[in-house]
């Protein structure tokens, strides 16, 4: 279910582990969302895990990509600016599945 929600995040937008957990009805499970996304590279269909950051916009999952700069690179290719591992204008780029997936 985590992968299904993550695949719906539009390019140029980001969401948080907690927002996905809340959408899935388990608001205390943001770490479980993170653990699931850590294995997303093994999925047959692409999962844009680079679009999921922590509640403050930090790229806390960057070390799970092929190289640490890849998560930032993928976001910046979509127009999301990142400085010091933090999404700039996080609130502008934030995509809330609870509002967008009704």
Image (cartoon, rainbow, N blue to C red):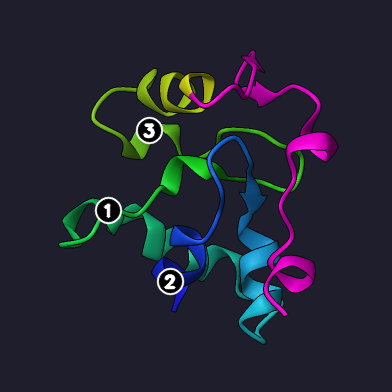
Q: Magenta residues, as a range?
A: 78-102
Q: Quadrant of the N terminus?
A: bottom left
Label 1 or label 3, whichever lies nearer to me, is 1
- Using the numbered discs, state the Cα–Cα distance from disc 1 to disc 3 in whole angstroms: 18 Å
Which one is nearer the viewer's eye here, 27 or 41?
A: 41
Q: Residue at x 56, y 33 (%)?
A: 59
Residue position marked by numbered label 3 in the rendering? 63
Q: Position of residue 24 (x, y in %)?
A: 61, 82
* Secondary structure state at the residue bearing disc 2: helix
- Within the image, what quadrant is residue 35 found in? bottom left
Residue position marked by numbered label 2 in the rendering? 4
Name above or below for residue 42 compared with residue 74: below
Q: Position of residue 55 (x, y in %)?
A: 74, 48
Determine which of the numbered discs, if any, sits on residue 38 in the image: none
Q: Position of residue 19 (x, y in %)?
A: 70, 64
- Using the numbered discs, state the Cα–Cα distance from disc 2 to disc 3 in whole angstroms: 22 Å
Residue 28 visible in image: no
Nearest to N terminus: mark 2 or mark 1:
2
* Secondary structure state at the residue bearing disc 3: helix
Residue 8 visible in image: yes
Residue position marked by numbered label 1 in the rendering? 46
């Amino acid at each position: 279910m985590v992968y299904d929600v993550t695949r719906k995040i539009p390019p140029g937008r980001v969401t948080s582990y907690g927002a996905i957990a809340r959408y899935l009805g388990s608001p205390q499970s943001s770490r479980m969302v993170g653990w699931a996304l850590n294995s997303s590279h093994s999925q047959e269909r692409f999962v844009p895990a680079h679009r999921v950051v922590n509640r403050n916009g930090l790229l806390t999952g960057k070390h799970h990509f092929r190289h640490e700069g890849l998560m930032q690179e993928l976001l910046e290719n979509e127009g999301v600016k990142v400085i010091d591992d933090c999404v700039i204008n996080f609130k502008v780029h934030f995509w809330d599945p609870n509002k967008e997936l009704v």
